[in-house]
Amino acid sequence: MHEHKIVSVNKGSPADLAGIRAGDLLIRLNGEEVGDVFDYHYQAEEVSVSVTVRREDGSEQTLTIEKGEDDDLGLVFAESLMDDYRSCRNKCIFCFIDQNPPGMRDTIYFKDDDSRLSFLQGNYITMTNMKESEIDRIIRYKLAPINISVHTTNPELRVEMLHNRFAGNILTHIEKLYKAEIPMNGQIVLCKGWNDGDELRRTIRDLLNFAPVMESLSVVPVGLSKFRDALCQLEPFSREESAEVIDIIEGFQKEAMERYGIHFVHASDEWYIVAEREFPAEETYDGYLQIENGVGMTRLLYEEFRAAVDQVRDAGEYHGLRALRMPKELRPYRKLMTMNPGRTVSSITGTLAVRNLEYIRGELERIRPDINYQVFPIVNDYFGHGITVTGLLTGQDIVAQLSGKDLGEALLIPKCCLKADENIFLDDMHLSELENALQVKTVIVESYGMDFLKAIIGVVE
């Protein structure tokens, strides 16, 4: 029997008014057991909900709660899933968690492959540890989108790459979700000599048949750290090989546009940087559906930052009496043309994205050439020089490479370098420790547009 401890009850909520209290155990909703958070929300959607709880004295009580259709019961549980997280059973040849150095916090080594996290947090799952009943539940509850780590649609190759004998039936699972019209997104981690070339063409062609229910597919290069002893030997893609990957993807984009009116398959930014190709136009990214996989981040940065600079420039063109006629939407930005003159500020980046921040510097000069904007690419000594993305930088590498440098009034830290809910780097260094070591104020940059520009200029809000 599933029992879920209620840690708190929102004041004034339907459950609070019905007399449910912290410490009670939730036993059933509408006469059915509650396995996890999705069972809970599905049953709690009713306007009349039968709630069975076990009180702290051991007695059971069933209460009928009447509520609005969109009202939450107001119960808070200790675990967000109301169940244990499901770990991955695969031994993928490209798994980055297997390439982590020893001595990191325990959560870094946990491999999740939980369909519920796919829906709640956008995680990608292989579907290798799912039973048919679980897929049926996704369809019943209409959980969407479901993000799927496909990698290859060749059954034998997928079994070999994931080292899981159940990995070969991925197309069967996808087809079932497709027929039920459950929106999906796909991902391919491309490994040189394994699932590239003709195998990549096969995978994209197979998955394109499920568009537009499968809304997008990203292709990202395998990440290779220096901690790969006893792991499958993989090599990075060269400039020419990266260009070939782009050509394959862009060829299928044309077909997808003709068939479905979407580009469907997308190359992550890294391919364009390594291939020394220009980034695609904004409309190519279909609304940036795959931005969390590094698809379109550079184009979005360019578009948003240029738009922010244009707004400040337009506001700065109003002088004297003309300021009275300034459009209302521009008024908050006029001060950005003149405040903090001669300011020096620094940014960090992984070595992959250096030219992105160089672009920022060029745009900034259009309105504030007096600001000394410094860009410091950080070499990843912690994971190895093959890891070039900004999101995998550690506090100790930043401190080691910036110590003794004049960083100016502030050091801008991209949000992606820090833990989602805490100001801690991957190596467990707290942001305050980095500030003390470098003797500089840090500013966390969360977006690409006006917030980024304000951080550079030194706006305190």
Image (cartoon, rainbow, N blue to C red):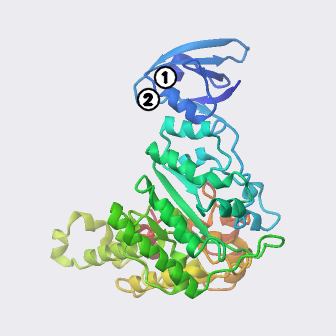
- Which residue is pictured at 47% across the width and 82% down the height? 343
Up-down relation of residue 289 to residue 13 (above or below): below
Which amino acid type is shown beneath numbered disc 1? Pro
Hey, which quadrant is residue 86 in on the image? Answer: top right
- Which residue is pictured at 44% across the width and 29% down the height? 71
Q: Which residue is mark 1?
A: 14
Up-down relation of residue 83 to residue 336 (above or below): above
x%, y% of residue 206? 50, 61
SS class of the residue under badge 2?
loop
Q: Which mark is residue 71?
A: 2
Q: Is residue 428 left or right of residue 356?
A: right
Q: Nearer the viewer, residue 58 or 320?
A: 58
**Tag 1–tag 2 contact (CB < 8 Å):** yes
x%, y% of residue 126? 63, 54
**Quadrant in the picture for the C terminus:** bottom left
Q: Is residue 178 visible?
A: yes
Q: Is residue 453 visible?
A: no
